[in-house]
Image (tube, helix red, strand yellow):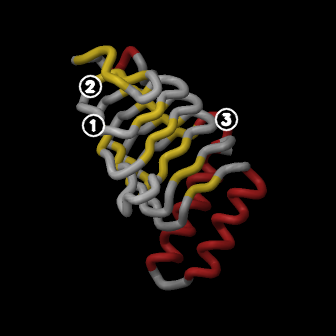
Amino acid sequence: MNSCVVALQRLAHALDRRGLRWPALLCVLINRLVFGCYLGCGARLGKRISLAYGALGIIVHDKAVIGDDVRIGAHVVIGGRSKHADVPVIGDRVVIATGAKVLGPIRIGDEAVIGANAVVIEDVPARCVVAGIPARVIKRDIDIRRYHDGL
């Protein structure tokens, strides 16, 4: 099921880049109705992205950039903030746990871990664990293989 969600988003992205906005939005709508997620057609998803539970409740802003080998839990929001035009850029091999909110013009470093239900509104350095509301660094210089079993 995960591959269907990502494949539909990739199709929507390709259609949108070719100026075929209505067919692209139709793909986004299918994802929303069938799988219960919103992956904007302009979002750039990296290779081998993993969306938990068939992407249930995941929202990804139309301008978001997500790196390779990223794992995203259910009910995660990757989006903008009012009064900010830019949206998050997620690095490679990042783990975003269930319910996390990654908001605004921020960068998440490679091999970072965002804890469950964290609200991230500031940049996250590479190889760190963040948690809380607002999210704060709670651990540095981690080995991502302890958190990301797909590597």
Pointer 2: what residue? Answer: 127
Q: Earlier in the sequence, mark 1 or mark 2?
A: 1
Q: Residue 5: image x %, image y %?
A: 63, 52
Q: Nearer the viewer, mark 1 or mark 3?
A: 1
Residue at 61%, 45% (x, y): give it.
Answer: 58
Question: Is 124 left or right of 44, judged from the image as shown?
Answer: left
The mark total stands at 3
SS class of the residue under badge 1? loop
Identify whether 38 is placed above or below 134. Answer: below
Measured from the top left, where is residue 20 in percent x and y?
55, 83
Q: Residue at x 54, y 61 (%)?
A: 40
Q: Position of residue 59 (x, y in %)?
A: 58, 49
- Which residue is pictured at 46% across the width and 60% down the height? 43
Helix, strand, or loop for circle 3? helix
Q: Does 92 sit left or right of 115 as displayed?
A: left
The answer to whether mark 1 and mark 2 are in CB contact below 8 A is: yes
Q: Amino acid at mark 2?
A: Arg
If you read the primary sequence from the N terminus, does the residue marked by circle 1 or circle 3 appear first?
Answer: 3
**Which residue position holds label 1?**
109
The quadrant of the rendering that contains the C terminus is: top left
Q: Count neighbours of disc 3 (C-alpha within 10 A) and say few if under 14, some if 14 to 19, many if 20 or more.
A: some
Which of discs 3 and 2 lies nearer the camera? The answer is 2
Q: Which residue is mark 3?
A: 53
In the displayed structure, would residue 9 be above or below residue 138? below
Q: Residue placed at 63% from the left, 81% from the top?
A: 22
